[in-house]
Amino acid sequence: MKIIIKLSKFLIILYFNGCEYIMLSIIVAIGNNNVIGLYNKMPWYIPDDLKYFKEKTLGKTVIMGRKTLESIGGPLKDRKNIVISRNKSYSSESFEVLHDFSEVKKYIDDDNENFIIGGAEIYREFLHFCEFLYVTRVYKDFKGDKFFDHIDENEWRIVNASGVKDYMDLKYEFFVYERYS
Ligand SMILES: NC(=O)c1ccc[n+]([C@@H]2O[C@H](COP(=O)([O-])OP(=O)(O)OC[C@H]3O[C@@H](n4cnc5c(N)ncnc54)[C@H](OP(=O)(O)O)[C@@H]3O)[C@@H](O)[C@H]2O)c1
């Protein structure tokens, strides 16, 4: 069973990487213990993090799961929105809906950075195909029901760190990781 899973991952990586280079990145905010969400919401509110998210993604393609779209209340302005759902009858005129994540390659922008913006299920499925992770570390314990996978130091190296910042009782820091294996 493990061999079949590994083989299918390998085939998907080949399919994604193919001959063309795709600039796929994850952007995520992560609390202690890898918490990223609770009851389909973000567990914290940090205006500077929302500003950072906007700066990075504006004018780009953003790819999200159907639950994240519902959590943010609709498509993001001034970005090309791609929403993934297994529900074949789910569609919209204001954003692209894909029913299989391998279709994403056809819709993303080859000349620009494309962002996976969540949530937990979508991050997990795309982590293997991303070159960069834009991670906001929020240094606090939060109750959560959605988690980001462990970022393996053998796979990812930090290429930028902002230093610790404060908002109210929260301490947070922006990191950029680059894949090196
Ligand atoms: N901290 C952060 O930076 C951050 C960012 C984004 C989201 N979040 C949080 O993450 C949570 C939501 O994450 P989640 O894991 O529950 O949901 P999600 O990843 O946003 O969406 C999951 C949905 O995506 C669709 N999907 C997933 N894999 C698919 C595939 N291979 N093919 C087709 N469709 C697929 C399915 O939609 P259907 O059910 O319609 O089939 C599935 O139910 C919320 O709490 C949100 O606030 C946190």
Image (cartoon, grey):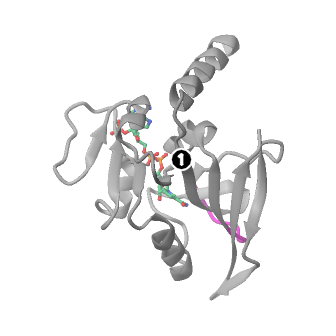
Camera-nearest residue between 110 and 92: 110
| Residue 21 x, y percent position in the rendering | 54, 39
Considering only vertical position in the picture, is 84 above or below 57? above
Residue at image location 57% in from the left, 59% down from the top: 28
Q: Does residue 83 appear to the left or right of 156 in the view shown?
A: left
**Does residue 138 show up magenta in the picture?**
yes
The image quadrant where one finds the C terminus is top right
Residue 129 shows in this picture: yes
Q: Where is residue 151 in the image (x, y as percent from the top left)?
A: 73, 48
Q: Residue furthest bottom?
A: 168
Q: Quadrant of the N terminus?
A: top right
Q: In this view, does 102 lie to the left or right of 85?
A: right
Q: Position of residue 78 (x, y in %)?
A: 31, 67
Instruction: State which region is magenta.
Output: 137-145
The residue wearing badge 1 is: 24
* Residue 102, quarter of picture: top left
* Residue kind at label 1, given as amino acid type: Leu
Characterize the local packing of mark 1: few (<14), some (14-19) or many (20 or more) Cα atoms within 10 angstroms.
many
Q: How many marks?
A: 1
Seen from the viewer's position, the closer of residues 76 and 139 is 76
**Vertical position of residue 125 compared to residue 138: above or below:** above
Magenta highlight: main SS: loop
Q: Position of residue 150 (x, y in %)?
A: 73, 47
Was residue 25 drawn as part of the magenta stretch in this picture? Answer: no
In the figure, 102 relative to 82: above or below? above
Residue 172 placement: quadrant:
bottom right
Q: Judge left or right: residue 155 versus residue 27.
A: right
Q: Which residue is drawn at 68% across and 62% down?
A: 176
Secondary structure of residue under mark 1: strand
